[in-house]
Image (cartoon, rainbow, N blue to C red):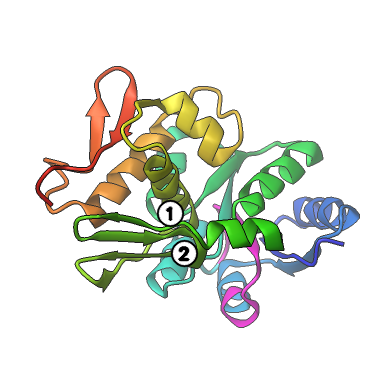
Amino acid sequence: MTNKTILVVEDEESIATLLKYNLERVGYEVLLAHDGKEGFDMALEHSPDLIILDLMLPTMDGMEVCKELRSQKKNIPIIMLTARDDEFDKVLGLELGADDYMTKPFSPREVIARVKAVLRRFTSGPQEQEEKEKNYFQFGKLEVYPDRFEAFLDKVPLEFTPKEFELLVYLLENKNRVLTRDQLLSAVWNYDFAGDTRIVDVHISHLRDKIEENSRKPKFIKTIRGIGYKFEEPKNV
């Protein structure tokens, strides 16, 4: 058993049942909600380890649920479901704090792969945790503690979604290295997004808004035109 709880918020009974069956088959405990308001309330009450959230829902749509959870500082990983292969939906969902998305129809194997990939970033054994606790990054007024999922700018706590924090830590671990968007997709999302590099750009934009004094003139996260990004320590911070 994984001892992980997943909340599935899906109004289509057949899809909800399919997700529940396949997730329970590999050891997850599954909670079901069939509309947005019910899903939002269950997320607050049960604090699941991960939420699979449909975009189109009665009472509250998936975008609203995601936005409200993030506004209440609930950093539960969220995988958004969309019935349309629509880039606008994907990007908007990510901008509101979703960590991943799947387009219907999807296979049970894809669901399990996505869930494991997202959860893998937030779980570790005792030895891994001991190693993580040795990690600490400081660049001027920016302090990041990967083991505690905490970051501060000029001693003021910063709020990140799980995926934003993973991306920040990966950039810090590879300071002064130029990283392509494909490298970041592979390392942080641990999944082949078939060239959807806009996902990286959205998350980089969010990080800049939070750690840069001027996100239009970033000092930490530099864009390497035509390639990707690089985290570097400015000389005067």
Specify whether residue 125 is painted magenta.
no
- Residue 80 lies left or right of residue 63; in this view the side is right
Residue on which the image places disc 2: 149
Front in this rendered view, residue 179 or 57: 179
Q: Is residue 8 above or below residue 226?
A: below
- Callout 1: few (<14), some (14-19), or many (20+) C-alpha neighbours within 10 Å? many
Residue at image position (49%, 57%) is 162
Q: Is residue 177 visible?
A: yes
Residue 1 position by quadrant: bottom right
Residue 165 numbered mark, or none: 1
Residue 47 numbered mark, or none: none
Q: Is residue 138 above or below residue 225?
A: below
The answer to which of marks 1 and 2 sits earlier in the sequence is 2
- Callout 2: few (<14), some (14-19), or many (20+) C-alpha neighbours within 10 Å? some
Front in this rendered view, residue 202 or 12: 202
Residue at image position (36%, 59%) is 144
Residue at image position (65%, 56%) is 128
Marks 1 and 2 in Cβ contact (< 8 Å)? yes
- Residue 216 lies left or right of residue 102; in this view the side is left
**Span of residues in magenta:** 43-58
Q: Residue furthest top?
A: 226
Residue at image position (31%, 32%) is 176
Q: Is residue 92 visible?
A: no
